[in-house]
């Protein structure tokens, strides 16, 4: 006997039996078959009870108007937080160290909703000032990518701007003292 759910909310189940001729089974095979069917029925019953019970607990039916308002706010915040962190990931490219991590709050319906989050981005300077400038441009874009950057996002962008300026100054210094050659390799007249 095989048991399979018809729909994902587990409210409608159908049992499919194997096409077996009972007369062709030995008494031992018959006994094993009945034991299997009985165990399958018990499993199905317990499985249905646990999922149907859980579905009823997480349902919005029976919630007060105050709880429904809280639930609506939590769902909205969850969408906002996930979109915010996804924007950082999309803009951060190769410098994203890890996916988003979230802080959760349980709602009155029993579900957990994201109420905060963060994405780890590599903000270290590179050995080459040009590479540091490119990297900090990406970090700035990633920090400011969400529609509403947080105070921490703006602080990361400011720190990346400072590192970019430092790298630009190092690059200008290198170009001045690199034997009279600029980035493109042409001679610069250093005489006044």
Image (spheres, grey):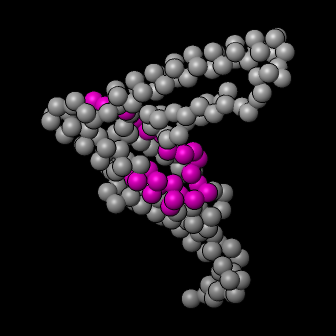
Q: Residue at x 41, y 48 (%)?
A: 82
User: In the rendered view, does 24 fall on the left or right side of 156?
Assistant: right
- Image coordinates of residue 41 in percent, x first then y, are 58, 19
Question: Residue 104 magenta-drawn?
Answer: yes
Q: Start and end of the magenta stretch?
A: 83-111
- Image coordinates of residue 172 in percent, x first then y, are 57, 72
Q: Is residue 67 above or below residue 77?
A: above
Q: Is residue 78 above or below residue 58?
A: below
- Image coordinates of residue 98 in percent, x first then y, are 57, 45
Asked which quadrant contains residue 102, the reply is top left
**Total numbered badges shown on the rendered structure:** 0
- Quadrant in which the N terminus appears: top right
Q: Is residue 88 above or below residue 61?
A: below
User: In the rendered view, does 142 fall on the left or right side of 80?
Assistant: right
Q: Residue furthest left?
A: 65
- Image coordinates of residue 167 in percent, x first then y, are 55, 63
Asked which quadrant contains residue 132, the reply is bottom right
- Quadrant in which the C terminus appears: bottom right
Towards the viewer: 56 or 183: 56
Towards the viewer: 29 or 97: 29
């Amino acid at each position: 006997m095989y048991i399979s759910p018809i729909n994902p909310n587990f409210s409608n189940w159908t049992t499919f039996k194997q096409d077996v001729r009972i007369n062709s089974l030995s008494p031992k095979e018959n006994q094993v078959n009945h034991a299997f069917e009985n165990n399958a029925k018990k499993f199905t019953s317990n499985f249905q009870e646990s999922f149907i019970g859980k579905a009823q607990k997480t349902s919005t039916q029976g919630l007060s108007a105050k709880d429904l308002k809280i639930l609506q706010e939590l769902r909205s915040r969850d969408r906002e937080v996930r979109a915010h962190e996804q924007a950082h990931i999309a803009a951060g490219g190769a410098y994203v160290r890890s996916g988003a991590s979230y802080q959760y709050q349980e709602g009155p319906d029993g579900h957990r909703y994201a109420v905060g989050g963060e994405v780890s981005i590599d903000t270290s300077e590179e050995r080459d000032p040009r590479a540091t400038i490119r990297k900090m441009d990406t970090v700035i874009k990633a920090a400011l990518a969400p529609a509403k950057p947080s105070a921490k996002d703006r602080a990361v962008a400011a720190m990346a701007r400072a590192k970019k300026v430092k790298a630009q100054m190092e690059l200008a210094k290198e170009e001045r003292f690199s034997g009279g050659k600029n980035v493109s390799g042409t001679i610069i007249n250093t005489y006044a």
